[in-house]
Image (spheres, rainbow, N blue to C red):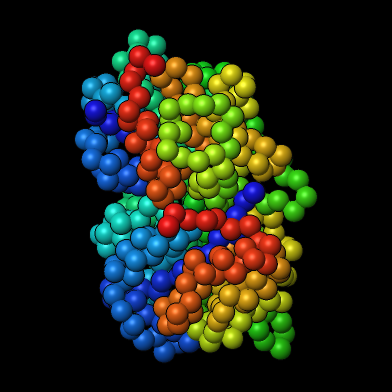
Amino acid sequence: MKVGIIDYGMGNVFSVKNAFLHLGASVVVSSDWQVLQNSSHLILPGVGSFADGMKNLNELDLVQPLKEHLVHKKACLLGICLGMQLLADEGEEGGCTAGLSLIPGPVKKMQTQHSERLPHLGWNQVEWSQENALLNGIDSKTDFYFAHSYHFEAQDAFVIARTPYCGEFVSIVTKENVVGTQFHPEKSSKAGLRLLQNFLERTPSC
Amino acid sequence: MLKTRVIPTLLWKDYGLVKGKAFDSWRRIGSLLPAIRVYNTRDVDELIVVDITASREGHEIDFETVEEFAADCFVPLTVGGGLRHIDQVTKLLRSGADKVCLNSVCYESPQFVEESAKRFGSQCVVVSIDAKKTEQGYVCYSHSGSQIQNQSPVLWAKEMQERGAGEILLTSIDRDGLMEGFDLELIQEVCDAVSVPVIASGGAGNYDDFYKAVQAKASAVAGASLFHFTEQTPRQAKEYLSKKGVAVRQGAQ
């Protein structure tokens, strides 16, 4: 297993790298596709705006090779936070922008209710809506760490967990060899590390 | 449900963990790194680490030391102290901080907050506001409480939110380190004025102080002296809050 963290200038790759090193994986951090393409497990981390994220991925010429690589099942991909949102068809943050279109649906601003505050920042429960090996060993309703104001309106078929806030939003999506978590598993203590371990056990053909 | 966070605050000076009283007479109480390891093992909700001398003495935060803390930290880590250039924020995030805490620089150039939020996202920009009660009402202070600013914390918090702060760390200078309770009036006023989360800080002496801050609408509560100097722990604080009906995270045992 070789973990490739896509470094596209969107925030802190340190924590993600640190978490995979802790799990004993071999890790490369790069913005160069020639380096990343040898990884069995790719990570798209990221904080910041949707528009900036796509702009950077495009400028680094990562979009097409990444998509082709995934279609040919050469790797698994995990998108974290903004990285999960970029899997979508489009996002409205920073102006309506096309996403990677790996999982269908748009990313929209969350709408607060009653006394809720934004960003949705802190620990909140993640409730399983489908069984998936990614969730092995973790109880439904375990708390994970979130920091975001937008959410991915994915179709039910691709949703494996939801979280109650601003009504309810999608906290884990998956389609074939692509996974996205709205929360930060690398900052979600033991449960988060377990989820990352489960991700490493996936094979690209799934 | 989004949980109320209980956050140990670690003040840092020359590699040491220090304790202050009303932002003065900081004394060394131990080493920082072992303290961070203990809190990580105890699975706290989050940690805030602030270099208290960086802005006063104008030196740069030690990024290598931050990397050392971060390597042992699998919960969110907020780091602050003397940040005044955008590349320092980049470096700090690259060193493993998940959020940066800005204070003095915001008064000198409020657009720094906008630039940071645009570049890194609001969710990693925490604006720290240190306030003191005066006869004219609450007033903000910068540079670890050493410089008065012509700003009320309520208006300043609103402006910082508009400029992109994702969270406000609100500290009462008067109550800091005294363990006699938070300044609840200050917390309530600021929480009512903004829609971003507010972390109440300065004065927690027991678990009920945390409960009172939550009643005053704080999204998170920070404590230093009570965790470092008494038998009280973040875990027991959360058990207390839970019994009072506040939703908290049950960490791993």
Please state which of residues B205 and B76 is positioned toward the viewer in this rendering. Answer: B205
Quarter of the image where the C terminus of chain B is located: bottom left
Task: Residue B226: give x, y in percent of width and height.
Answer: 49, 79
Which residue is located at x 59 percent, y 19 percent?
A157
Q: Is residue B137 above or below residue B163?
A: below
User: Taking A134 as reference, is B155 above or below it?
Assistant: below
Which of B34/B191 is in front? B34
Image quadrant where residue A27 sits:
top left
Q: Residue furthest top?
A: A72
Residue A62, placed above or below residue B228:
above
Q: Percent from the top left, x then y, of residue A151?
A: 60, 34
Query: Which of B151 and A142 lies nearest the eye of the viewer?
Result: A142
Q: Is residue A70 above or below residue A202?
A: above
Give coordinates of residue A206: x percent, y percent. Answer: 39, 16
Q: How many marks?
A: 0
Residue at the location (49% across, 24% down)?
A: A174
On the question of residue B156 being in view, the answer is no
List x then y, in percent, for residue B106.
Answer: 53, 64
Q: Is residue A175 visible?
A: yes
**For this view, does A204 lie left or right of residue B4?**
left
In which quarter of the view is residue B20 placed?
A: bottom left
Q: In the image, what residue occupies the spot 32% across and 30% down?
A: A200
Question: Image point 43% across, 45% down: which residue?
Answer: A191
Relative to residue B62, is residue B77 drawn left or right?
A: right
Q: Is residue B188 left or right of residue A96?
A: right
